[in-house]
Amino acid sequence: MTVALKSPRVPDHVVDAQFTGRWSPRAFTAETMSEEALLTLLEAARWAPSAVNVQPWRFAWGLRGDAGFAAIAGALVPFNGWAKEAAALVAVASKTTRTASDGSEVANPSHAFDAGAAWVSLALQAHLAGWAAHGMGGFDAEAAAKALDLPEDHVIHAIVAIGRIGDPASLPEALRAREVPSQRLPLSALAGHGKFPA
């Protein structure tokens, strides 16, 4: 069963409904996800913009019930145990260096920024396809790196749970009240004309 929820979010300025309609639930249905459906989300991430077209983002993924899912789930902190009910888990990482024109490896200062662009592309594609994606920072980075064979010059930024929005009653009681789309600060608190807001 997919639970419909009218978003209480109201933008300060007119934007497409995909931006206010997308949110990060914790309750998921038991519906499974096909590999093709997940690869479509990763394909959207592949087309994200990146500095000098380096494309530093990297993903490790698993579908509920397979070894990849178990490896990623095993790195989650206990608070994020709800994510083990998701249809898929994706670890988002980036390569911290890039190959310079002379062939040497140099630092890529925008690797995390670019990985963030890829993650939001995945999240919006998920929303457009009727899935929900919830990014989490609550994981053991060392355990995840080991379980997923993360190369040395890479860093994991987040783990994303993907599934169909489910019934909040399936969550531990402490999380049920939080199962609503979160609000945002007013735009005036985030963006300033000619200078950053105080």
Image (cartoon, helix red, strand yellow):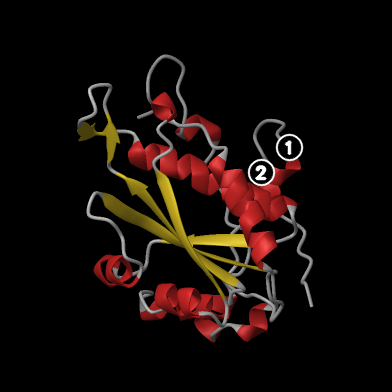
Q: Label 1 neighbourhood size at 10 Å, few (<14), some (14-19), many (20+)?
A: few
**Nearer to us in this view, 71 or 20:** 71
Residue 103's disc number: none
Residue lying at the far top in this picture: please name it.
194
Q: Image quadrant for the N terminus? A: bottom right
**Nearer to us in this view, 91 or 27:** 91
**Disc 1 + disc 2, Cβ < 8 Å:** yes
Badge 2 is on which residue? Answer: 19
Q: Image quadrant for the C terminus? A: top left
Residue lying at the far front in this picture: please name it.
103
From the viewer's perspective, tell me whether residue 106 is left or right of residue 31. Answer: left
Where residue 148 sits, quadrant-wise, is: bottom left
Mark 2: secondary structure? helix
From the viewer's perspective, tell me whether residue 82 is left or right of residue 112. Answer: right
Residue under the point 58% across and 82% down: 171
Q: Amino acid at mark 1?
A: Asp
Mark 1: secondary structure? loop
Residue under the point 38% across and 79% down: 74
Which percent across, then down, holds residue 23? 62, 56
Residue 33 sits above or below residue 194 on the image: below
Which percent across, then down, holds residue 52? 40, 24
Q: Amino acid at mark 2?
A: Phe
Residue 173 sits above or below residue 56 on the image: below
From the viewer's perspective, tell me whether residue 168 is left or right of residue 76. Answer: right
Badge 1 is on which residue? Answer: 16
Query: Is residue 61 visible to the viewer in this orientation of the structure?
Result: yes
Residue under the point 33% across and 72% down: 147
**Nearer to us in this view, 8 or 140:** 140
Residue 164 sits above or below residue 150 on the image: below
